[in-house]
Amino acid sequence: MPRPAVLWTAVLGLMLGLGTAPIAAGQPSSPSSPDIIRDTVRLAPDGTVEIDDTRAGTITVTTWDRDRIAYEIAPVSDEDSMLTSIVSVSHTDQEFAIDQDGASWSIRIPGLLRISPSGGKNLAARYRITMPATAMLEVDDINSTIEVSNLEADMEIDTHQGEVVVDSAGGMLDLRTHTGQIHATGVREGVALEVHAGDASVSFEDFAASSTAETVSGTLRFFLPAEAGFSLQTDRTDAVTVGEAFGSSATDDERWLFNGGGPTLTLDTPPAGTVEVRSLKAPEGPGQR
């Protein structure tokens, strides 16, 4: 086999191996506080933070301009103190270079930090995460209160009946809940919103990317700058109210264009669900479509 082929075969094997093996695990902070896990580890600015299988308590995520992630995990009560014995924290962050006959190759694998309480225990915990503002966030939860602020990258949050609060988001938002509440402000890209029987409110600082929303029986409220141009696409015009601040609409195939049109807001609303699109300014009177 030619030497370059051998080299890349070895590189591929190394990449696959790194993708499946955790590098480090979180440990209790000190013998004096055995019920708290905390650490600060390196994380690539374009890495990913995963928080999986959380069931109750709080998850608070803030950001900083450092290639580090700091985390702290603490039980909510004495009954939850065994959390530290089942929580799993794994971390990978790889970077390596190879030089052969004066030719250099450099490969970097974005970091991943994953937090997951295993064992199926219904334990409540307080999770505090400070992560790079440009790293991605993924949360899979049952019934926690989740707060995320000042994240510039994409985020994905799925909760069954918890409460989600997002403030100042520069990336795409993928937010899902069954019966919980979602409240997002300062959104500067788009959203993919899925709500079964809960309620959601999304305020756009800038409606810059096409968005989708789906509800079965909940109420969805979108707030956009009054001057924002957008296109509305829905099969249920009777279930959607658009505020007067956006003026009259023009039609383009199956879309309604406001302020000349722009990114598309696609709404899937069965008979029991309702959607409102309002201006960020003062509340308005009855709207129009």
Image: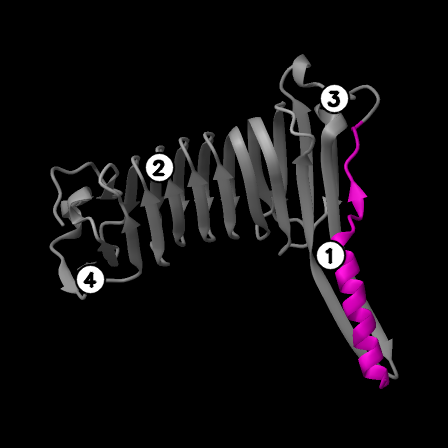
- In the image, 228 versus 7, the foreground residue is 7
Q: Secondary structure at mark 1?
A: helix
Label 4 sits on residue: 254
Q: Of marks 2 and 1, which one's residue comes earlier in the chain?
A: 1
Q: Residues within 10 Å of mark 2 (few under 14, many from 20)?
A: many
Residue 97 location (% of width, % of height): 81, 69
Compared across the picture, whether 13 is left or right of 54 comes to: right
Picture disc at residue 200: 2
Q: Of marks 3 and 1, which one's residue comes earlier in the chain?
A: 1
Q: Of marks 3 and 4, which one's residue comes earlier in the chain?
A: 3
Give the Cα separation between the discs numbered 3 and 1. Answer: 30 Å
Give the Cα separation between the discs numbered 4 and 2. Answer: 25 Å
Q: Secondary structure at mark 2?
A: strand
Residue 220 location (% of width, % of height): 30, 39
Residue shown at 56% from the left, 33% from the top: 60
- In the image, 60 versus 275, the foreground residue is 275
Label 3 sits on residue: 35
- Answer above or below: position of 184 versus 56: below
Picture disc at residue 132: none
Residue 165 location (% of width, % of height): 45, 35
Q: Residue furthest top?
A: 78
